[in-house]
Image (cartoon, rainbow, N blue to C red):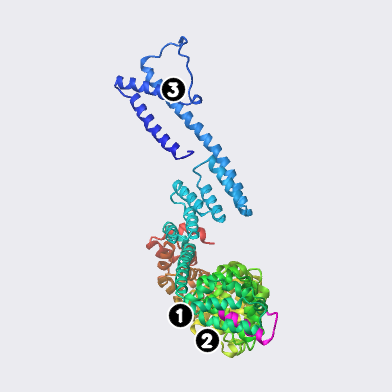
């Protein structure tokens, strides 16, 4: 319908027509006659295009209809007219929708170019064609917000909700418009409505709710600061006086340094922080040529470095637990550039204050978001890594802690996808190859930070294919085992495990050495090291037949069997996977397993006791491999093997891998020794075996 009035008129017409049709079919002649008169009047009122004309002055040469046909003729004629009218309206509607969609697309193109006025015009022209197209309202609202026409944006969102009361975009844009108008209650209601309607957008909505809270808090802080200043309190007056003195140009660095030191002492509370902000404190400092020169490290004398330290200390004080000041600082170009570069300043005091300022941002999700949105992530990563690489660096722990927290931010990871080799891989692998007392306290956190970065799929792939990484991992293995650096070895194994889930030529090249190193760790006293080493084996072995052959020769089967008998579920999961890979490789590994466990009781126990799909599925597959050896099936006569396999083959349909592997094992068992078929028949399992016959090679 073109608008809401059309909808109402249409519904009234439907009710009226339904009543007429019912009366025309009435058995009462008077009712029928009255209905015919009303129908004629209704048809006469239709537009010219929707009805035929009749010259009533002419002589009707057509013979009159038999009375019994009058009712049928009139009803059919009436319904045909209505059907034609509906079809005409449908075609007209389709044409208008097509035009409106074309205008919407042009509006979207204009919006993408940043031409918001033109976008509004196209969306408005589209709404002139079709007044109930939801996307036109929400798209125009978005353009209005860009033009700071917030009331019009809210109106469009309200119309979009009349068309579709479940429109998430309408609530989203309306919430943003209300927020810009400082109507915090209305904005909060809009964002909370989205959370009620679609729980999957909770993270995005939470960001905006936090923003509403922050804006509300900022307004309250500013009102309070103005009230206290109006009372003429000495502390608040001192802030303005000091800012005024800092406006004086061409003074010595020592002059500004003293002023900033005093200012840092009077802006320690919320009121002082707010007065600094509302009185343009950030711009006053960053626009000062002497201060800016020190921040950009253009001068290296002692007074200039002291001034640089004073600026960083002040920024730290005014941003502490103050979201709005943190945001304002990140909007300052001089601050954004200097904070990144001063991480590697030649002066230890400057490095210290700069890292502490970054650390302040890293402590909250909003602070991290502000930093990653405004700072150059590539240079920041490079400089943080340089801070950790210095053998006598006193602040390496702070630098690596900052990197770890920023690495948890998705935006930060995305920004680093294309710069990893020079910024991260080279310094990281250099440190791994040269573990010493000076960097051993940094490496565990650094490895954890790299693991966080690898949560990004692109970075994960790149690191897994990076040959330098695997060379460094092997070098670190040797150093850690030789020097007992277990605090490094544990996170390193975790990182290697995560990266080895990717199949890559680099892993294949070093697979034998990696597996050999892991085998040596299986005798370690630390259970976590054993578990992680086993996990690495389970990931690397499927990528290299050479590595499989090597570990079999090194008695890996007996070691895995030992793990399966007495470790936790995680170690069991990786041990049975490793065992399955080895027994799939040939008879030698199978014979080693049977030599240590003649009736395969360990594997049968896993089948009967484990609820984990990976453990059950691999246990069944490992049994299937062993059943290919002559005499194994005969040894198991009289055991519960048929029952165990049958339960899994006929089990939960969602555990398809377990079903398939159990069916394969059951089929091989019965083929190897047909006497198991009798047990299968007793358990009424032949149908299951027959249905799974396609799995048996």
Q: Quadrant of residue 296?
A: bottom right
Q: Is residue 575 visible?
A: yes
**Can you tell which quarter of the image residue 348 is in?**
bottom right
Residue 106 lies in the magenta stretch: no
| Magenta stretch in the rendered image | 297-315
How many residues crowd mark 2 within 10 Å: few (<14), some (14–19), many (20+)? few
- Judge by depth and name the residue closer to the eye, 277 or 159: 277
Seen in the picture, residue 294 relative to 61 is either above or below; the reply is below
Furthest toward the left, the residue is 28
Q: Secondary structure at mark 1?
A: loop
User: How far across and down, in percent of the image, does residue 216 sit?
Assistant: 45, 66
Q: Position of residue 71 (x, y in %)?
A: 37, 20
Residue ID at (66%, 75%): 423
Q: Which residue carries the number 2 mark?
A: 524
Q: Nearer the viewer, residue 39 or 433?
A: 39
Residue depicted at x 56% and y 70%: 328
Q: Position of residue 325 (x, y in %)?
A: 53, 72
Q: Which mark is residue 44?
A: 3
Q: Residues within 10 Å of mark 1 (few under 14, many from 20)?
A: some
| Discs 2, 3 touching: Cβ within 8 Å | no
Please state which of the two labelled residues, at mark 3 or mark 1, is closer to the viewer: 3
Q: Which residue is mark 1?
A: 567
Instruction: Give the distance between the C-alpha atoms of the residues marked 2 and 1, in whole angstroms.
Output: 14 Å
Closest to the observer: 626 or 211? 211
Task: Give the foreground label among 2 and 3.
Answer: 3
């Amino acid at each position: 319908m073109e608008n809401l009035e059309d909808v109402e008129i249409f519904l009234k017409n439907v009710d009226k027509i339904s009543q007429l049709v019912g009366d025309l079919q009435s058995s009462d002649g008077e009712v029928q006659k009255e209905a015919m008169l009303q129908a004629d009047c209704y048809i006469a009122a239709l537009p010219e295009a929707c009805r035929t004309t009749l010259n009533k002055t002419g002589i009707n040469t057509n013979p009159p209809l038999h009375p019994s046909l009058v009712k049928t003729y009139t009803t059919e004629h009436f319904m045909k007219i209505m059907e034609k009218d509906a079809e005409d309206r449908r075609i007209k509607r389709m044409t208008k929708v097509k035009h409106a969609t074309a205008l919407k697309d042009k509006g979207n193109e204009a919006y993408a170019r940043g031409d918001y006025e033109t976008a509004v015009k196209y969306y408005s022209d589209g709404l002139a064609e079709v007044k109930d197209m939801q996307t036109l309202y929400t798209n125009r609202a978005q353009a209005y917000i860009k033009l700071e026409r917030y009331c019009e944006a809210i109106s469009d969102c309200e119309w979009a909700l009349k068309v579709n009361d479940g429109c998430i975009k309408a609530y989203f844009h309306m919430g943003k418009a209300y927020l810009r108008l400082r109507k915090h209650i209305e904005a909060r209601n809009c964002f909370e409505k989205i959370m009620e309607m679609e729980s999957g957008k909770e993270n995005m909505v939470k960001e905006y709710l936090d923003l509403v809270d922050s804006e509300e808090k900022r307004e309250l802080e500013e009102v309070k600061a103005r009230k206290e200043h109006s009372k003429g309190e000495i502390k608040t007056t001192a802030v303005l006086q000091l800012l005024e003195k800092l406006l004086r140009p061409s003074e010595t660095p020592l002059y500004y340094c003293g002023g900033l030191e005093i200012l840092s002492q009077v802006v320690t509370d919320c009121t002082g922080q707010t007065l600094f902000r509302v009185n343009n404190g950030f711009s006053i400092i960053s626009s000062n040529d002497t201060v800016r020169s020190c921040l950009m490290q253009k001068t290296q004398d002692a007074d200039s470095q002291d001034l640089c330290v004073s600026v960083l200390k002040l920024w730290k004080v005014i941003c502490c637990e103050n979201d709005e000041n943190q945001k304002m600082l990140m909007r300052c170009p001089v601050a954004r550039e200097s904070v990144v570069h001063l991480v590697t300043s030649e002066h230890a005091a400057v490095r210290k204050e700069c890292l502490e300022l970054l650390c302040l941002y890293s402590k909250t999700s909003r602070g991290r978001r502000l930093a990653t949105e405004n700072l150059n992530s590539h240079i920041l990563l490079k400089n943080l890594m340089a801070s950790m690489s210095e053998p006598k660096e006193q602040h390496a722990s702070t630098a690596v802690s900052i990197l770890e927290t920023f690495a948890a931010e998705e935006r930060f990871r995305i920004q680093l996808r294309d710069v990893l080799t020079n910024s991260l891989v080279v310094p990281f692998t250099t440190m791994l190859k040269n573990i010493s007392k000076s960097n051993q306290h940094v490496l565990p956190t650094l490895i954890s930070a790299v693991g966080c970065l690898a949560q990004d799929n692109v970075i994960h792939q790149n690191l897994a294919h990076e040959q330098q990484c695997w060379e460094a991992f092997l070098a670190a293995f040797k150093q850690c085992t030789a020097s007992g650096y277990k605090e490094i070895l544990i996170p390193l194994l975790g990182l290697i495990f995560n990266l080895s889930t990717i199949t890559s030529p680099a892993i294949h090249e070093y697979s034998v050495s990696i597996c050999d190193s892991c085998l040596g760790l299986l005798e370690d006293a630390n259970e976590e090291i054993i578990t992680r080493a086993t996990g690495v084996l389970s990931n690397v072995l499927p990528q290299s037949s050479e590595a499989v052959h090597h570990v079999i020769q090194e008695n890996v089967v007996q070691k895995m069997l030992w793990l399966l008998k007495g470790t936790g579920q995680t170690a069991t999961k990786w041990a049975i996977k490793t065992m399955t890979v080895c027994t799939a490789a040939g008879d030698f590994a199978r014979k080693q397993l049977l030599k240590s466990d003649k009736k395969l009781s360990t594997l049968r126990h896993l089948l009967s006791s484990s609820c984990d799909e990976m453990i059950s599925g691999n246990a069944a597959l490992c049994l299937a491999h062993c059943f290919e050896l002559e005499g194994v099936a005969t040894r198991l006569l009289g055991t519960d093997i048929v029952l165990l396999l049958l339960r899994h083959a006929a089990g939960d349909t969602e555990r398809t891998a377990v079903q398939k592997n159990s069916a394969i094992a059951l089929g091989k068992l019965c083929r190897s020794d047909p006497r198991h078929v009798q047990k299968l028949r007793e358990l009424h399992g032949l149908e299951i075996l027959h249905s799974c016959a396609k799995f048996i090679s």
